[in-house]
Amino acid sequence: MATNPFSGACLAVAVALSLLAAVPVWAEPQPLSLQQAVAAALDNSPELVSLRKEAGVFDAAAVRAGVIPNPTLELEAATGALTGSSDDSNVSVGISQEFLLGDKRLKRRTVAERDLAGYRWQVADRERALKEQVQAAYCDVLLAQERVGLAHHSIDLNKQLLQVAADRLTAGDIPELEMYLVRVELVRSEANLIELQRTLLDSRAKLFALMALPPTAAPLLGGTLNRNDVRIKGVGDLKQAAMQSRPDLKALHAAMQKSDAEVVLAEAEGIPNLTAGVALSRDTSSMEIGGVEGRETSYTIGLKLSMPIPVFDRNQAGQQEARAKRSSAEIRLQGAAVSVEREVESAHASLANAEKVLSLYRSDILRQLDENLKLTQEAYRLGEVGILAVIEEQKKYFEVSDRYLAALHARQVALNELESAVAADINGGAQ
């Protein structure tokens, strides 16, 4: 039976397509967002990891505070062999237990638990500080990337200008000196690019060090400095939010609560503890009656209670020390609250100033600069202006563009500082 060549070709195409469909398609690596960078730093930071491990120390302190004192085993033996009464002896076995009065165990556990709470807030405050550092480093990398892109644009414009100058020199419209001036500008822009690339490498290295990434990891960043404006609450609302959210304030508040518990514990430590014991004794003695020697053994059970008499020491020094620590903790909390208010005010003012600077650049300045540059370039191509006018206009364009990038960077850094000062995502977590 003859085979249809057309059907065979269709079958071959179908098989090829099925094989291509079976080949896995590897997705491109996703750019690293700011949230991912912060999360990686919080998870990988050796300082934070080691600090979190110290929670076991505070847990152990809480366990130790609630432990009951161990009982004491007492053994006693006496013999009269050294005094000429070898048949006389005494053996006593006893056990004693110290009882903590004044509810000391509960009060010690309260001190340990509040110490643990303060430690956890200290860890949270260190996370807040690291987050601000990562945000600043991330913004530095974005700024360096934007400046490298701007430097590439400068090189492209200088190359275009060099081509126009070469055409006009060939036509005899300009002297050779103008060609040299354009070449100097091109070399200068290329040297500037090399310097900016070095700055970019340094910024990336700083960010990756904060993230604790391995040396071989070098992810690309996917953020941008040119973001939409955010609505910021009034400074009064931000201060109130900071007072409720700042982990360093909560850590100091926990330290003051711990000091209160230490005062109560110090007062309880002035109450002496009671020690109760029970002992079993065996007494063996010899006696002689009417020339007949005999031995007598007796057993006794005794109860012993002991307690120090608080005549000279009622833990006055411990109480004084605890009250002094409490006063110190209260002063530190009050001072920190004032510092936080000033920090919020400063960050809020910095953000407001950055927004004002950006509004100046966004009032058609950049668009007008771009139009002026294009008009000047076209005028030079037509021979209406000299090369110096074009070079000056290009310098002005790139200087203003660089300042605009710096203003965007300053606005983002100010926003990050304000969020860190308030310890909250002001714009709903969008970074």
Image (tube, helix red, strand yellow):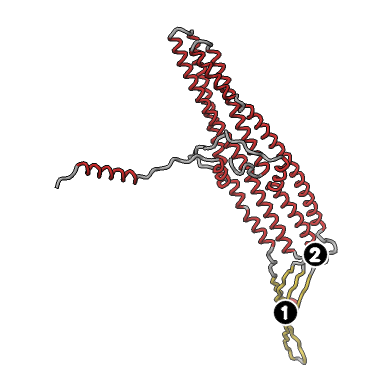
Dot 1 and dot 2 residues touching (CB under 8 Å): no
Q: CA distance from mark 1 to mark 2?
A: 32 Å
Query: Where does residue 336 sit, x and y in percent of width and height?
Result: 74, 44
Give left or right: position of 310 versus 150.
right
Query: Would residue 313 be found to the left or right of residue 294 on screen?
Result: right
362, above or below 175, in the image? below
Q: Which residue is mark 1?
A: 281
Q: Amino acid at mark 2?
A: Ile
Q: Residue at position x 78%, y 59% from top?
A: 264
**Residue 55, image x, y percentages:** 63, 54
**Location of residue 194 with respect to 333 vertically, above or below:** above
Secondary-structure class at tag 1: strand
Q: Residue furthest bottom?
A: 290
The x and y percentages for residue 353 are 68, 31
Compared to 429, does 297 lie above or below? below
Q: Secondary structure at mark 2?
A: loop
Give the residue number, with chain letter if any, for mark 2.
Answer: 271
Mark 2, other Cα within 10 Å: few <14 / some 14–19 / many ≥20:
many
Q: Residues within 10 Å of mark 1 (few under 14, many from 20)?
A: some
Q: Residue 312: x and y, percent? A: 85, 61
Q: Earlier in the sequence, mark 1 or mark 2?
A: 2
Residue in front for this viewpoint, 215 or 362? 362
Q: Residue visible at 82% across and 58% down?
A: 316
Along the horizontal axis of the image, is 230 left or right of 218? right
Amino acid tagged 1: Ser
